[in-house]
Image (cartoon, grey):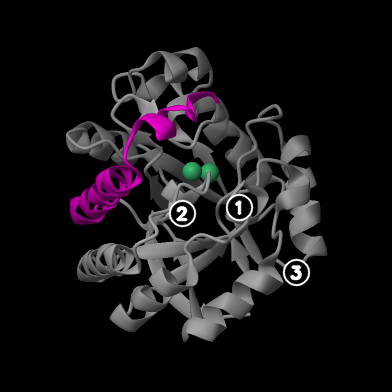
Amino acid sequence: MLTDYHIHVERGPYTVEWLREFKKQAEKVGIEEWGISEHAYRFVETSHIFMNNWVKERQTETMKDYLAMIGDAREQGMKVKFGIEMDYFPGKEEEISRFISEYPFDYVIGSVHWIDQWGFDLDEMKEEWDKRKVEDVWVEYFNRIVSLAESRLFDIAGHIDLAKIFKYIPTDDNFLLEQYQRVAKVLADNELTIEISTAGLRKPVGEIYPQPTLLKKCCQHGVPIVINSDAHCPEDVGADYRQAVELARSVGYSEVQVFNHRKRIAKKLG
Ligand SMILES: [Zn+2]
Ligand SMILES: [Zn+2]
């Protein structure tokens, strides 16, 4: 079984025609099940959760239109899952929980893109990396992944080592191992699924999220996986899946999770 649950259609209109482009690509590359996971911050309904100027400028969509597109597609016989990629902010658990409970999602991806007011994966905020100690940023980042898992608000943790995006990576292997260890344990304790994301291959780091040592630790702790592309255009649906499947198998995985109405079941990988 191959699935792709991390797809953004935000670069086009919320129409079935646009969705069909993604479906075509999914079929072409052998993805059996796929779903859309728009960024929650794009929707006016999250304006009380996400408050900074970068986000505010982009808060232009409504959940009503998003839902209508999925509804129309399903009416026309298209099998598309309804998901969302939700930014996790410590202290906003109640608001996030309320938002999630209002919509019939098949799955919710929880992601950390912000350390307070710093969007550390944004090109336009990249200089901030040079002003900080890399180890401190990584600890802050993983602290948020830990709280994200402990919140139990999400089904899938997105790109769990996103902090490596611009190659600001700690060089001390023991430091990294310690961080990976605590992250893998808390993911397992809270029964969260993680994604193997091929998006990292399209970023400066040029490497899948998460990197092999962290992924292996997750596998040893029994953390389930999905494979995702984080596509922002039809061409990227299912991108580089061969490499992702190989990586998953190499660290010991033989199953992926399939999501329906926020319940997961395991299927054979590949
Ligand atoms: Zn993301
Ligand atoms: Zn995404």
Question: Looking at the image, can residue 80 be seen?
Answer: no
Picture coordinates of residue 236, whole percent (x, y): 72, 51
Q: Secondary structure at mark 2?
A: loop
Q: Amino acid at mark 3?
A: Gly
Could you tell whether 163 is left or right of 191 in the image?
A: right
Q: Is residue 123 left or right of residue 98?
A: right
243 versus 144 height, above or below: below
Q: Which residue is mark 1?
A: 199
Does residue 175 lie above or below 103 as drawn? below
Is the shortest distance between ligand 1 and the CB of mark 2 under 8 Å?
yes
- Tag of residue 159: 2
- Snapshot quadrant of residue 117: top left
Count how many numbered circles sit on residues in the image: 3
Query: What SS does tag 3 mark?
Result: loop
Alpha carbon distance from label 2 to label 3: 22 Å
Q: Which residue is mark 3?
A: 30
Give left or right: position of 91 versus 21: left
Numbered disc 1: secondary structure = helix
Q: Is mark 1 within 8 Å of ligand 2?
A: yes
Q: Tell me the mark number nearer the camera, choosing from 2 and 3.
A: 2
Q: Are marks 2 and 3 in contact (CB under 8 Å)?
A: no
* Tag 1 near tag 2, CB within 8 Å: yes
Mark pair 3, 1: CA separation: 18 Å
Region in magenta: 124-152
